[in-house]
Amino acid sequence: MKEIICDKCKIPLKKAKVSFRYLGFEVHADVLKCPSCGQVFVSEEMVREKVRKVEMSVEDK
Amino acid sequence: MSETIARNEAEYFAKDCIYGAKPACTCSCPFNFDVPKFIDYIQKGKFTLAYRHFQDQSVFPGIVSNLCSEPCRENCVRKDVDSVISLSMLEKACVEFTEKTEPKRFNLPARNKKIAIIGAGLCGLTCAQRLGAKSYDVTVYEKTDRIGGRLWGLLDPEIFLPEIELQLQNARVSFELNTEINSLDDITFDAAFIATGMAGDDFLLSEGTDSKSLSTARPGVFLGGSLLNTAPIGDIGQGIIAYHSIEKYLKVGGMGGIPETFIIDECRLEMDLSRVETADQIRPSHEGRFTREEAVQEAKRCLECNCTACSDCCEIFDHFKNWPCAMVRDAVASLHTKTSIKEQNATRTMNSCNLCGLCKEMCPKDIDMGKFFHDFRYFKSEDKMLPPAFHDFFIRDMHFSNNEAFFAQTAPGYQTASHVFFPGCQLGASDPRYVEKTYDWLLENISDTAIIQGCCGAPADWGADRALHEETIDMLRNEWDKMGKPKVIFACPTCKHQFEEFIPEAEGVSLYRILDEKGLTGNHRNSYEEACVFDPCSSRYDSTMQESVRNLAAKAGSRLTELFYSREKAQCCGWGGHTEEANPSLFKKVVNNRISSSQLPYITYCTNCKDTFLEKGKECMHILDIVHGLDNDRSGPPTLSQKRKNRLTVKRDLLKRIWGIEMKDTEEADETVSIYIPENVQQKMDILKILEEDVVKTIKTSETSGYRLYDQETDTYIVHLRIGIITYWVMYKKTGEMIKIANVYSHRMEIVETLDDWTDK
């Protein structure tokens, strides 16, 4: 299967727990991350399905 | 500058709001019958539910429907349109058509409280039914040998006796007939209700009885009914109040009753009947009674009186299903719940308001929710509880306008000016020709006219950034001052409004007034044959500007039709107050409603109105399109990125052509990357408020640092960068030095990454 790779380290990304911060709140989610350099990938689908909802909910608190 | 609301008085801001106030019919009714809810059921043909509601409120629907003398007829507002609603006939219809008549059964355990009710007339029976249904131990003492009191002289006993039996079937009530009570000390009770009727024994307690709660001077004893000169239906109202007051007394000991249950006979509602259509009263066809269909039709004539002046003119109230009083309450509460996990939408509500002030104009009590939300944004901002992302794009855009795109020049050969043209930030952004051709014309007609292209500060004010707003106002005042305090010529009504509020010493005039006075430029084009002028909301109280634009349009050949919401009732196009970022769905709804207000094309004089409408496909021109004879064949407004370039174009062109000054190209540094953005991606960028420069910066930063991802399946690079408070994601394909953007998106949450030296600070 053709994967998304880290172009800097030339290795495939792996699922890892990553923190997100917004307006003083911190949440964690599993996203793809380079095991070597640590850069992450947040897909548009995740932004639309999850990130946006969390943003709305934090803004409404 | 208008006075700011004091935080400690904010909760009273909408205290005069009459939304939900009892309508005239309810206030006329001796038991404050909730007519709108009753009507609502009948309108839907739900006669059983209508009966249940009527039963809950009147206790004896079969008696009330026969005894009711319709005091509401006197006050029904429909009488000023055609004829009143036949409420008594509707009551009879619901009694006739209901499928169930059994009263509620509460299934409560017996309460160890004895209630004495003296008098078995309608008042005493009403109180007895309510308390008995709640399982209090109720004894009704009646000196005669029959129940019903004065009903015997008013109705056929074949009607009222079965009804009393029906409604008391689930109540714990016993009767002591032929029992005259001479002294309250002769009976034992925890609470008592004296309802002995006209000329009945009041046990010397009438005097001093509180007419609201029906409490007497003796603890636990209440008094009401025709002892206090009520009409027969008033007995019902007082019986219900006595029930509430007694129950409160038994539970908490107070004699003051429950204010919410007291009878309200003064109607606070004010109804605007100007748009009510006439509808003939329905005549009963069935032996003087309504058929089901006739009852439904008659109920549909009811105006269901309520004040909806604000929600009729603005979508925010329906969107949040909330009303001024509740919005104020929620906003005040939100100031104290910083760490609450409870979801609330007060912050989103206050940032969803266009701040246009139309609600105040339409409100019979002059409540200005725009003012309230404006000031509350500042409160939230001071408390660091205003999500910056709601206003970030607009504040960045304002920063651009007042830096890279800003210029201030006196006319060639002049050190000062009698007039200065202030096109604002969006006029040139929408079309550079609006500014350039207007300034050329002004120089021809008023040769010492200076120009200041910049932002008036409205975005900082709407985004409640006080420091930035004050800084902007000071800067503009200073520029204006340096030019010798000239008269300011405004093209944008929002700029004019901002100056009037924050730099009131600067005398202003609308460009359109000058154009109207001088006559058309001669280069004008024909206007639409028939059109509506869409007044920008910020022109609300500027009738001169509104009139000038109409004159110009008419001179250019337009036959004008007024929109219902125009002039002082002008509605916001949706753009005001930056609501799009806080509430995209409401923004869409507002824009769609505005463009649907008339099938005719619009002529406006705010570029935000024009571009917002063009974006949605509405035929629309700016009055300057007509004045300067500009072709308007673009399919839509410029993109956000193009709007920035347009402002630089105005600056570059005018500086060079009029003053011979070459402008340094600030964008030059970013031109080393050759980037192609397909149209569909550009459209998406506009929706997401992503600028070309954000995309370029994201790619360049990642290309330099080497931090990028590669999607093998699509042969696409993926990069991201946090600029300010937004994280931008860009996907692109690369062929040599050519970059083609495949996709973009963004989010507000910050990813906590451990990478160094690559996140833009």
Image (cartoon, coloured by chain):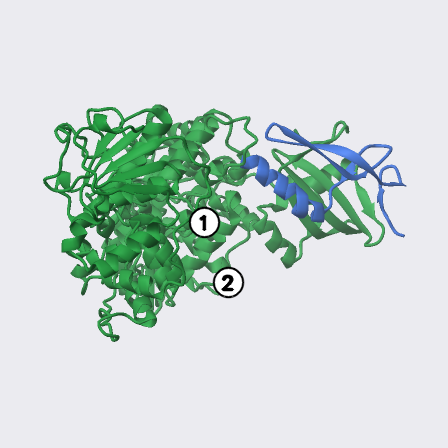
**In the figure, residue B670 lies in which quadrant?**
top right
Q: Say how many tags the image has.
A: 2
**Mark 2 closeness class: few <14, some 14–19, many ≥20 residues within 10 Å:** few
Chain (blue): A
Which subunit holds the residue at mark 1? B
Residue pictured at 55% horizontal, 26% vertical: B339
Q: Alpha-carbon distance for marks 2 and 1?
A: 33 Å
What x and y, as percent, mark residue B216?
Answer: 20, 28
- What x and y, as percent, mark residue B62? 28, 57
Q: Is residue A2 left or right of residue B605?
A: right
Same chain for the residues at labels 2 and 1, yes or no? yes
User: Which numbered marker is on residue B319?
Assistant: 1
Q: The chain shown in green is which?
A: B
Q: Going from the N terminus, do you reach mark 2 or mark 1 first?
A: 1
| Residue B666 x %, y % | 59, 39
User: Could one spot residue B665 in this view of the protein?
Assistant: no
Residue B634, numbered circle? 2
- The amino acid beneath tag 2 is Arg
Q: Amino acid at mark 1?
A: His
Q: Residue at x 38, y 68 (%)?
A: B599
Between B469 and B319, the residue placed more toward the observer is: B319
User: How many residues crowd around disc 1 within 10 Å: few (fewer than 14), some, or many (20 or more)?
Assistant: some
Q: Nearer the viewer, residue B365 or B472?
A: B365
Q: Position of residue B196 (x, y in %)?
A: 17, 39
